[in-house]
Image (cartoon, rainbow, N blue to C red):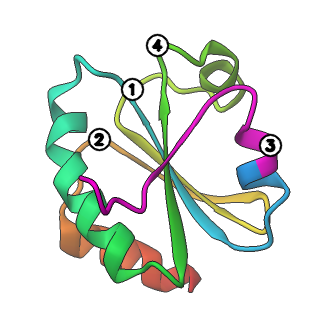
Amino acid sequence: MSDSKIINLNDDNFEKNVIKKNSVILVDFWAEWCRPCKMLIPILEDLSKEYFNKIKICKVNVEQNHKLSKKYLIKSIPTLILFKNGIVKDTRIGSISKLQLKEFFNIYI
């Protein structure tokens, strides 16, 4: 995990790192106790390296960032929200395979 390209976000730095960026950003809303969230970690790690110059991958812990969870109506986790130029473009909820994530990314890059 030392060479991870994934950025941890919170209520305070989210706008600066997502909303005000002119790029494609995937935000993973997750929690420590969530088994499907944990299963997604190695997939996101791999894709953060593979798509390093194309998509920024970020994580938001829903337990610690209630404002963001409420703002984006997070009801189930993992919830993956894809932003392009600060605008929500698409959402995926629940477990997702590496192939499905790549297909999801390729729509927007």
In this rendering, would 35 be left or right of 24? left
Crowdedness of circle 3 by 10 Å Cα count: few (<14), some, many (20+)? some
Vertical order, 47 against 71 (above or below): below
Residue at the disc numbered 2: 94
Given the image, on which type of amino acid does mark 1 rest? Ser
Query: Of callouts 2 and 3, which one flags the residue occurring earlier in the amino acid sequence?
Result: 3
Are dots 2 and 3 in contact, CB under 8 Å? no
Q: Residue shown at 66%/19% (left/top)?
A: 70
Vertical order, 61 against 6 (above or below): above
Residue at the disc numbered 1: 76
Q: Which region of the structure is painted magenta?
A: 1-16
Residue at the disc numbered 4: 63
Q: Mark 4 to mark 3: distance in Å? A: 18 Å
Q: Residue shown at 54%/83% (left/top)?
A: 54
Residue at the disc numbered 3: 15
**Element on which disc 1 rests:** loop
Q: Mark 1 to mark 4: distance in Å? A: 12 Å
Residue 37: x and y, percent? Answer: 25, 36
Q: Main secondary structure of the magenta part?
A: loop
For discs 1 and 3, the disc positioned in front in the rendered view? 3
Query: Of callouts 4 and 2, which one flags the residue occurring earlier in the amino acid sequence?
Result: 4
Residue 23: x and y, percent? Answer: 71, 73
Residue 71: x and y, percent? Answer: 72, 26
For discs 2 and 3, the disc positioned in front in the rendered view? 3
Q: Mark 1 to mark 2: distance in Å? A: 7 Å
Q: Mark 2 to mark 3: distance in Å? A: 24 Å
Vertical order, 107 against 77 (above or below): below
Choose between 109 and 21: the one closer to the eye: 21
